[in-house]
Image (cartoon, rainbow, N blue to C red):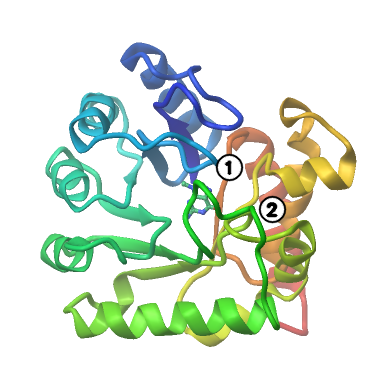
């Protein structure tokens, strides 16, 4: 899943793709490099980011979704928590909802049920503005898994087909570096959710902490983390550097398929 942020303030590429033409070129490049999904977002979820109105978010993402749909068959995912944006984005051609709030915003469950598209339910402790202030867990892996199971049950009860759901532990969303490392090390436990696992660790601050690298120097660490995630059972990797990640994942997939202890 290639990341296309059409925002002025995302943590690693804020402002780079916020003109539709540049965004379109980036989408083309990601498609050529092997992205299987292009995830388009118009509101930054980095800690402390400003809220964006529904209209502003729509103005950012809808022209880009329409343009991307014209130039590639690669499926588009809409990265949003707002029901109105979900509806308009799917109307414009998106076929997946990537919701960091796991459909907890009022009206989001109904929107996803009505739209009948794939949905990624992500775990987050707290809200983006404050989530990194004092994250705390007894056992992070157990608590994240149990939250995701509960959200699956709630989504299914709201009329969303279970086979449309994907789960995501939400690296960096209300988690310390230790929590993120524990989740990556024990990712296989998320298989208990019974749904494909999506992992987004690309360029995140835990990788900066581990490597002492600035955000734009974290591509090797991001690929390493993506490979570890796939070896731990992840089926979708959300990444900025699509070409390098695809290479890493080809190696990981070949090794995983050849392993005798799945
Ligand atoms: C939008 N966004 C930022 N980070 C993310 C992550 O780790 N997973 C998902 N699903 N979305 C994310």
Give above or below for 4 relative to 15.
below
Which residue, given by chain and number where applicable, does mark 1 sit on?
Answer: 239
**Pointers 2 and 1 in contact (C-beta within 8 Å):** yes
Q: Residue at x 32, y 76 (%)?
A: 163
- Numbered label tally: 2
Q: Position of residue 65 (x, y in %)?
A: 26, 32
Rendered image quadrant of residue 103: bottom left
Residue situated in front as seen by the camera: 206 or 37: 206
The local crowd at label 2, few if under 14, some if 14 to 19, many if 20 or more residues have their Cα within 10 Å, is many
x then y, percent, for residue 71: 29, 25
Identify residue for label 2. 226
Q: What residue is shown at x 31% (from left), y 52% (from top)?
A: 81
Few, some or many C-alpha atoms within 10 Å of disc 1 (few <14, some 14-19, many ≥20)?
many
Q: CA distance from mark 2 to mark 1?
A: 8 Å
User: Observer-nearest residue: 201 or 154?
Assistant: 154
Give the left or right position of residue 4, taking residue 130 as reference: left
Q: Position of residue 33 (x, y in %)?
A: 55, 32
The C terminus, quarter of image = bottom right
Residue 224 placement (x, y as % from top left): 79, 49
**Residue plotted at (29% across, 82% down):** 154
Numbered tag placed on residue 75 in the rendering: none
Q: Residue at x 47, y 55 (%)?
A: 127
Asked which quadrant contains residue 186, the reply is bottom right
Q: Is residue 58 left or right of residue 184?
A: left
Q: Earlier in the sequence, mark 2 or mark 1?
A: 2
Helix, strand, or loop for circle 1?
loop
Secondary structure type for disc 2: helix
Asked if 153 appears above or below 7 in the picture, the reply is: below
For label 2, being within 8 Å of ligand 1 is answered no
In this image, 74 relative to 113: left or right? right
Does the closest atom of ligand 1 sit within 8 Å of the Cβ of label 1?
A: no
Classify 90 as above or below 165.
Answer: above
């Amino acid at each position: 899943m290639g990341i296309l942020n059409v925002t002025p303030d995302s943590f690693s590429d804020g402002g780079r793709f916020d003109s539709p033409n540049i965004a379109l070129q980036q989408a083309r490049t990601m498609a050529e490099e092997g992205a299987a999904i292009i995830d388009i977002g118009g509101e930054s979820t980095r800690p402390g980011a400003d809220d964006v109105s529904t209209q502003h978010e729509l103005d950012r993402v809808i022209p880009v979704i329409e343009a991307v749909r014209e130039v590639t068959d690669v499926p588009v995912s809409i990265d949003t928590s707002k029901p109105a944006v979900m509806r308009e984005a799917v109307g414009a051609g998106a076929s997946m909802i990537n919701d960091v709030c796991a459909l907890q915003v009022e009206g989001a469950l109904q929107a996803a049920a009505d739209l009948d598209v794939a949905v990624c339910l992500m775990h987050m402790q707290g809200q983006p503005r404050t989530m990194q202030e004092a994250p705390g867990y007894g056992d992070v892996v157990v608590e994240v898994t149990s939250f995701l199971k509960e959200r699956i049950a709630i989504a299914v009860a709201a009329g969303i087909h279970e086979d449309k759901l994907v789960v995501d532990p939400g690296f960096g969303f209300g988690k310390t570096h230790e929590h993120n490392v524990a989740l990556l090390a024990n990712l296989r436990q998320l298989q208990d959710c019974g749904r494909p696992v999506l992992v987004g660790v690309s360029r995140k601050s835990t990788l900066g902490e581990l490597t002492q690298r600035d955000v734009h120097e974290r591509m090797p660490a991001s690929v390493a983390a993506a490979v570890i995630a796939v070896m731990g059972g992840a089926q979708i990797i959300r990444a900025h550097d699509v070409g390098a990640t695809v290479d890493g994942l080809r190696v990981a997939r070949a090794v995983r398929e050849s392993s005798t202890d799945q």
